[in-house]
């Protein structure tokens, strides 16, 4: 057996993702899971995607199954999609990745060497932490306001302190786990700060297509005249996680560096999947899929908020009210530890993720992340009622 001391420090430092451990509860059919970050199983467009796969294999034959460069029509489609959202970019600035997570890994390599400082939110998606720990970065954390997104004064303080951070990773829309979006005013200030302090911003945005209420503020990339913002998108939540397909939009001038970094990790994304996802998007199926998905998500979000109002409000809980995405963040009375509650909830056949799992520097023990997309309205109501019972036990 190999000794642990033979492994790199990085391999030893990386913790097993708590999410992965908790996720096993998500697959037990007895348990109503509010734990996952999954788009709704019943909304995944299996048949329409099968048609795209068939068309691609019939038309492209071996080319769909060979090594190949990033699929140009998909890059062009993505450039046009980003342009609709106000981002002026050429297909050459769009890099196909295996999901947003790989985008984070690539951009961390583009800017940071081990030990370099990077700014992340104090409560953030666990995959962001896996990247900063995995790359041995010195993280500085900033707080996130539950109604307007990351705290800009804290961000400026982090940008101003020496040594200057090499990178900041922010989640702009329907934050995982907080459900909040960054306000327009804050977006403008963030791009100004990035320009003034010359800190690249990674705008990690898998959730913006999942808006079901309100109007979308421009992405930070669209406001970024100084070319400091690197945008990351993903098909995971808008189509299906198993595509493992996402993209980076980078400013001009770094194309060949991003390309070689990407190639050093895994050569390229699957030709078959790139072609099938392009077919799906180009045929208009993606657009109608999103209309359906967001209508379902809105109904489920409303059911969850109504159940929270009925069952958890009287117990002193408060929660965010997302206009899209997959998550509600609940703050419980301070006397309640959500890890203890988790075990009591599992006994009542409900799973969620304790908020502390997302807290980079600890704390947030009286919080939890609830997913509303992957259960029917009836089951969501039932689950929240059981949570309330678990709190009262
Ligand atoms: C904020 C955020 N970034 C990145 C990812 C990773 O997404 P992907 O499946 O595209 O790698 C997730 C997944 O949950 C996420 O919530």
Image (tube, grey):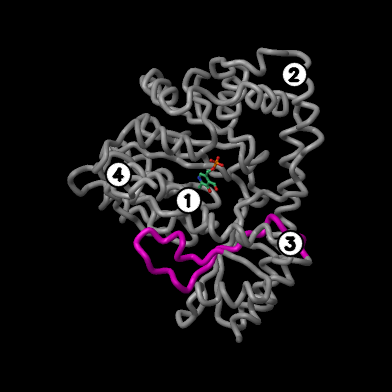
Segment tinted magenta in the rendering: 353-377
Q: Residues within 10 Å of mark 2 (few under 14, many from 20)?
A: some
From where the camera sits, is residue 132 visible?
no
Where is mark 1, residue-wise?
Answer: 182
Where is mark 4, residue-wise?
Answer: 6
- Residue shown at 67% from the left, 17% from the top: 64
User: Is tag 4's residue or tag 2's residue first in the polypeptide sequence?
Assistant: 4
- Residue shown at 49% from the left, 25% from the top: 95
Question: Nearer the viewer's eye, disc 1 or disc 2?
Answer: 2
Relative to 161, 104 lies left or right = right
User: Magenta stretch containing residue 158, yes or no?
Assistant: no
Question: Nearer the viewer's eye, disc 3 or disc 2?
Answer: 3
Quadrant of the drawing holding the C terminus:
bottom right
User: Magenta stretch containing residue 361, yes or no?
Assistant: yes
Where is mark 3, residue-wise?
Answer: 29
Question: Nearer the viewer's eye, disc 4 or disc 3?
Answer: 4
Residue 349: x, y in percent? 68, 71
Q: Are marks 4 and 2 in contact (CB under 8 Å)?
A: no
Q: Are marks 1 and 3 in contact (CB under 8 Å)?
A: no
């Amino acid at each position: 057996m190999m000794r642990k001391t033979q492994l790199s420090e990085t391999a030893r430092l990386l913790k097993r993702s708590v999410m992965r451990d908790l996720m096993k509860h998500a697959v037990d059919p007895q348990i109503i899971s509010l734990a996952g970050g999954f788009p709704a199983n019943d909304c995944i467009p299996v048949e329409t995607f099968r048609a795209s796969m068939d068309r691609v294999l019939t038309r492209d034959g071996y080319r769909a199954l060979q090594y190949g460069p990033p699929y140009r029509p998909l890059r062009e489609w993505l450039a046009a999609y980003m342009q609709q959202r106000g981002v002026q970019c050429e297909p050459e600035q769009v890099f196909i990745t295996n999901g947003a997570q790989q985008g984070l890994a690539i951009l961390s390599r583009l800017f940071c060497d081990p030990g370099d400082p990077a700014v992340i939110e104090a409560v953030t998606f666990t995959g962001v932490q896996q990247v900063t720990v995995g790359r041995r970065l010195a993280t500085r954390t900033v707080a996130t306001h539950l109604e307007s997104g990351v705290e800009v004064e804290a961000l400026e303080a982090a940008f101003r302190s020496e040594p200057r951070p090499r990178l900041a990773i922010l989640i702009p829309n329907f934050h995982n786990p907080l459900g909040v979006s960054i306000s327009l005013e804050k977006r403008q200030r963030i791009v100004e700060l990035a320009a003034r302090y010359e800190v690249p911003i990674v705008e990690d945005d898998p959730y913006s297509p999942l808006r079901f209420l309100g109007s979308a503020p421009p992405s930070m990339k669209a406001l970024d005249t100084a070319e400091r913002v690197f945008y990351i998108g993903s098909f995971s939540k808008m189509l299906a996680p198993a595509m493992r397909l996402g993209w980076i939009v980078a400013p001009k001038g770094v194309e060949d560096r991003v390309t070689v970094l990407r190639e050093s990790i895994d050569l390229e994304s699957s030709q078959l999947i790139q072609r099938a996802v392009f077919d799906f998007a180009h045929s208009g199926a993606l657009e109608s899929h999103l209309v359906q998905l967001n209508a379902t998500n809105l109904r489920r979000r409303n059911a969850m908020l109504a159940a929270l109002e009925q069952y958890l409000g009287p117990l002193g809980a408060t929660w965010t009210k997302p206009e899209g995405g997959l998550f509600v963040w609940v703050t419980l009375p301070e006397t309640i530890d959500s890890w203890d509650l988790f075990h009591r909830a599992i006994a009542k056949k409900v799973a969620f993720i304790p908020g502390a799992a997302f807290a980079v520097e600890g704390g947030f023990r009286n919080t939890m992340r609830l997913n509303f997309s992957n259960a029917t309205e009836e089951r969501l109501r039932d689950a929240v009622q059981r949570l309330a019972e678990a709190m009262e036990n």
